Image: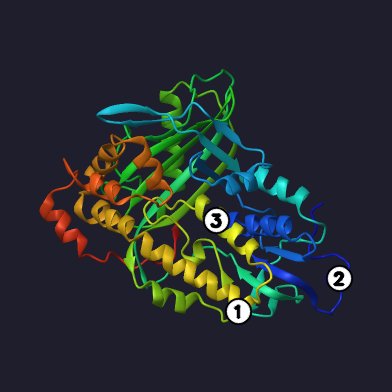
């Protein structure tokens, strides 16, 4: 049963005590709460979210090969869409079907499952955290929540210490009068125009399509660009155009999502950690740096962190904070190769030619592609991506290796 901060305890001036307080009810925070509850059902957990629902308005997708057996078990009770017959990619030079299964979870189903799974009194919705410290959380309404362990799972914090570009997207769930003919996800249709929607030159752009049912389709327009401008009107018009081209003009919108995500090409991660650190508070999720630098992918990292935190549930908050900071440093170090590829994408490839980078990548072996998305590319994988017929010129690639990129600044919306 869902609860709010406005229960009997919240109406008193006495601080409310918990074993663990999690600030931020997105993917990372929600999975941590679930994993902790399953591992230690006697714990009293506070999951604090400023919005009205957990997960916001979002959809998370992943490949069936991304998760461990324990990770699949953690997600097993969520209602989600799945395609065991693989997925497709489409580029100017070819179309390809890949065999790896694909999964997708909506924030609606995420919220509904956690509402049933977590004990009454766990979920505190519509509660903004005004301040966080190692001993608890002060909410906007004046309530103080105290906890032995505090975990910060708030959204990514733009910083001058991190460099890169942006992945900008707008998605729409459409219910059609007539059944569509899409059999499997099209995770990249890059046959579309490669010009940035706000008219600032080229950008790697693709359309992402999920067949959610015989009459339901999710269409998302995504592009990699140098600035974080989200032009909702332009992207919505492009979705209209794509739907019309596919004969889906009789559809009724029933849902949407949008976002601006960082694509990391470099930076001073130690300085970033200094910037976001709250002494004694563990940090997880994108704010902690747990993202795929090139794809902004988070599901495997969120699942692994949730399981790791649940395994260390008895540690004092300060020790857990140190463990998570060390995990973030390790993740940053292990994903340096993907930041290099990001530099090739943004600085070696001309904007209108960025499509060639992904077009060549998706011509490689499926196992390599699977490992790429989980951030576990082998040494041979890394050589293979760069070896052969490179999608960018050697001189431009060498120059790009030493570029830092623009500092990531706060998001802009139109």
Residue in front for this viewpoint, 255 or 250:
255
Q: CA distance from mark 1 to mark 3?
A: 20 Å
User: Residue 138 — which label?
Assistant: none
- Give the secondary structure at mark 2: helix
At x 33%, y 34%, the residue is 192
* Residue 157 visible somewhere in the drawing: no
Q: Quadrant of residue 367?
A: top left
Which mark's residue is nearer the viewer, 1 or 2?
1
- Give the secondary structure at mark 3: helix
Q: CA distance from mark 2 to mark 3?
A: 33 Å
Q: Position of residue 159 (x, y in %)?
A: 41, 71
Residue 175, placed above or below residue 128: above
Q: Nearer the N terminus, badge 2 or badge 3?
A: 2
User: Residue 9 — which label?
Assistant: 2
State the residue position of label 1: 318
Q: Nearer the N terminus, badge 1 or badge 3?
A: 3
State the residue position of label 3: 304
């Amino acid at each position: 049963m869902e609860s709010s901060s406005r229960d009997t305890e919240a109406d008193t001036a006495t601080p409310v005590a918990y074993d663990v307080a999690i600030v931020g009810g997105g993917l990372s925070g929600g999975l941590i709460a679930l994993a902790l509850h399953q591992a230690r059902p006697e714990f009293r957990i506070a999951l604090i979210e400023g919005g009205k629902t957990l997960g916001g308005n979002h959809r998370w997708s992943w490949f069936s090969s991304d998760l461990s057996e324990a990770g699949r078990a953690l997600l097993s009770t969520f209602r989600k869409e799945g395609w065991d017959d693989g997925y497709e990619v489409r580029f100017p030079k070819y179309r390809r079907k890949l065999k790896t299964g694909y999964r997708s979870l909506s924030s609606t189903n995420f919220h509904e499952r956690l509402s049933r799974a977590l004990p009454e009194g766990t979920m505190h919705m519509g509660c903004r955290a005004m301040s966080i410290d190692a001993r608890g959380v002060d909410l906007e309404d004046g309530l103080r929540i105290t906890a032995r362990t505090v975990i910060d799972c708030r959204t990514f914090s733009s910083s001058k210490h991190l460099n890169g570009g942006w992945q900008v997207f707008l998605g729409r769930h459409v219910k059609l009068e007539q059944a569509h003919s899409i059999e499997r996800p099209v995770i990249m249709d890059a046959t579309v125009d490669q010009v940035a929607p706000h008219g600032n030159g080229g950008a790697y752009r693709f359309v992402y399509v999920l067949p959610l049912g015989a009459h339901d389709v999710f269409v998302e327009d995504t592009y990699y660009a140098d600035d974080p401008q989200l032009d909702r009107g332009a992207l919505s018009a492009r979705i209209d155009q794509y739907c019309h081209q596919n004969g889906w003009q009789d559809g009724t919108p029933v849902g949407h999502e949008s976002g601006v995500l960082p694509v990391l090409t470099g930076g001073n991660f130690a300085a970033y950690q200094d910037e976001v650190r709250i002494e004694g508070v563990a940090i997880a999720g994108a704010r902690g740096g747990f993202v795929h630098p090139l794809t902004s992918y988070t599901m495997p990292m969120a699942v692994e962190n949730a399981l790791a935190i649940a395994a260390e549930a008895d540690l004092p908050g300060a020790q857990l904070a140190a463990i998570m900071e060390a995990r973030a440093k390790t993740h940053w170090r292990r994903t340096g190769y993907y930041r290099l590829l990001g530099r090739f994408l943004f600085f070696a490839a001309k904007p209108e030619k960025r499509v060639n980078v992904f077009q060549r990548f998706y011509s490689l072996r499926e196992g390599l592609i699977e490992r790429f998305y989980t951030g576990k590319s082998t040494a041979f994988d890394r050589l293979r991506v760069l070896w052969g017929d490179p999608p960018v010129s050697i001189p431009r690639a060498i120059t790009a290796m030493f570029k830092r990129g623009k500092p990531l600044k706060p998001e802009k919306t139109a």
